[in-house]
Amino acid sequence: MKINYHILFRACDKVESVHKVKRPFGLSKIRTIKVSFYSMYQALQESGDNYQFSIIGDDLSDELLEFFQQFEDVKVDNTRLGSAAKSLQKQIEIALSIPDNDWVYLCEDDYLHTPYAFQYLSEFIKNSQQYIKTSGKKKNYMNRIIGDLSETPLIIHTPDYPDRYDPPWKRLSFIFLSKYCHWRQISNTTHTFLLKSETIKQFETYIKASAIGPSDSKLSEKVYGRILFKGKALCVSPIHGLSTHMTEGVMTPLVDWQSICQSNIQKMKDKGLWLD
């Protein structure tokens, strides 16, 4: 069984960094976008699953437009939106039009992915009913209250943010084991996440509300369960992370991101897609 992925990649190269934080490895914003896009594009090829890849551009430069045009199976929708909120709102509207059982990846333009990202994701998704099932048998009283998590909507956040290991953010979490890695229940994400289209529709009101601002905290508080899951979704992230936010200080730990970045740059150089 192949998964149908719809990649909705928001891109804007007008602002280097919203929080004025440096990009890693001396990259500019436009180069960060290129290597982030290419790493995900290549990982999709490796997975063997079906995909549709769309760029939601906000007044992209000619350089980026020419770059994306070299990928024949990538659709570019470029307009002058003028803000992250409007770009996110457009992304959500597109996601709501996608068939219920297809998986939608709402992704910002500065997340570098491992070459095996979609291989791990697909294996986990295909077997998620088995991996995340919980039972209230014997003396597991907490699970009696929680119920069977395999019946809970699933959302995946692909990076593993290092602040989750800091004292203020350490908390009790479910841990699941798949074929390739572990997955941890989390309750906070950015607006980069993977879920079924039917799940977006289920939480449409809250997801749309979180796009005003935008507000990551509104998304996290209203959509993700922590201890109880009635009316909430189960959100998990992989350990080790399958992507990283390309911003200094928040990069996914224990993965050699510099090597992954350089490998993708070299592949683009070999194909004439990256000019020094």
Image (spheres, rainbow, N blue to C red):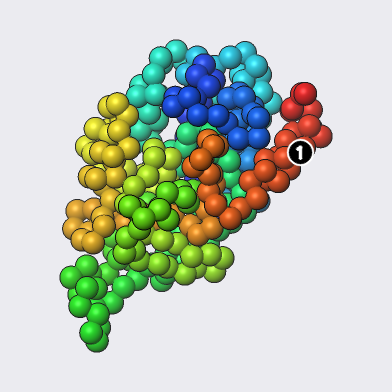
- Left or right, 24 with respect to 225, comes to right
Residue toward you, 1 or 194: 194
Kindly tell me whether residue 34 is visible in this rendering.
Answer: no
Position of residue 45 measured from the top left corner of the image (x, y, whole percent) = 65, 46
Q: Residue drawn at (61%, 19%), measured in percent from left and top?
A: 65
**Residue 137 coordinates in the image, percent (x, y):** 25, 83
Q: Is residue 11 visible?
A: yes
The image quadrant that residue 220 belongs to is: top left
20 vs 120: above or below: above
The amino acid beneath tag 1 is Lys
Q: Position of residue 171 (x, y in %)?
A: 32, 60
* SS class, disc 1: helix
The residue that mark 1 highlights is 267
Give residue 135's position: percent from left, percent from top: 28, 77
Residue drawn at 47 percent across, 50 percent down? 162
Q: Is residue 259 left or right of residue 29?
A: right
Q: Quadrant of residue 28?
A: top right
Residue most extreme to the bottom: 138
- Residue pictured at 76% horizontal, 38% vertical: 267
